[in-house]
Image (spheres, rainbow, N blue to C red):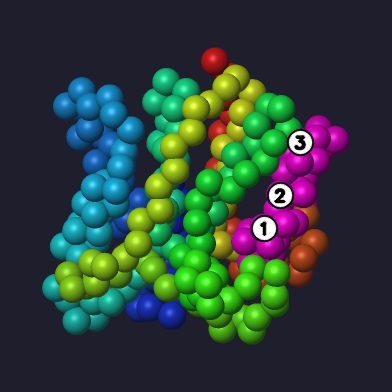
Amino acid sequence: FAVAVGVSSSRHASLASNYALEAWRKIQQQREGSGVTDLADGRVIRKIHTELCRRMADHPSTRGSATTIAIAHVIDRRLRVLNVGDSPVWLRRASGEVSMLSKDHTVLQGLIDRGEARADVEYASFYQALEHALVADYDADDFAIHSATVELDVGDEIILCTDGVANALDNYDMAAALRDRTAADPIDALCKTVASRSLVDDYSIIWIKVTR
């Protein structure tokens, strides 16, 4: 499962995100056809970037187009999350525990990681700009790849979102929304919560539940 969002400040952003998802689909088909049973790792993201460059970097009109990507790869109740950018992936345990498995590759998060900013202080929206993304440029290969691996149990749920959700709900509000077990349809409830925040961006949600 994967989501990708074109970086709006780049040219042909939607095309970049489509190419990234298409590359992931093809890589998965090749892995399955070859009998590969290991969870995907950072090398898969590098292959996606290479394919993005092959499709776009050689053309002046599309060079520099950029996208985020977040992947949730599940094999035999083992989950690996890979992401570049700020499309979040959450885990909602059957026990009620909620955690974010992806990492935001924003300027602010980079400052926090380096001890140059504080997580409990509100900063200007400029600092929410992306620090890392997949860019259709062969030289732009120094992007960070976040990886997390967890064991899953029956009843656990994995939620992948595009940044439209993250723009409407910060991590605290998102965690609170996912902890709410009163809604008969949790996906509909989350969508209504997002819509109530005067959302100006579109968004996508993939909701996966472990049933066996």
Q: Which residues are magenta?
A: 165-192
* In front: label 2 or label 3: 2
Give the labeled residue for mark 3: 185
- Tell me: 11 left or right of 206: left
The answer to whether marks 2 and 1 mark residues whose Cβ atoms lie closer than 8 Å is yes
**Count of picture labels:** 3
Residue count near mark 1 (Cα–Cα under 10 Å), binned few <14, some 14–19, many ≥20: some
Residues 198 and 93: in front is 93
Q: Is residue 199 visible?
A: yes
State the residue at coordinates (47%, 23%): 77
* In front: label 1 or label 3: 1
Give the labeled residue for mark 1: 171
Residue count near mark 2 (Cα–Cα under 10 Å), binned few <14, some 14–19, many ≥20: some
Give the labeled residue for mark 2: 175
Vertical position of residue 97 compared to residue 83: above or below: above
- Residue 33 sits in quarter: top left
| Three-letter amino acid code of the residue under disc 1 | Asn
The earlier-in-sequence mark between 2 and 3 is 2
State the residue at coordinates (50%, 51%): 102
The kind of secondary structure element at disc 1 is helix
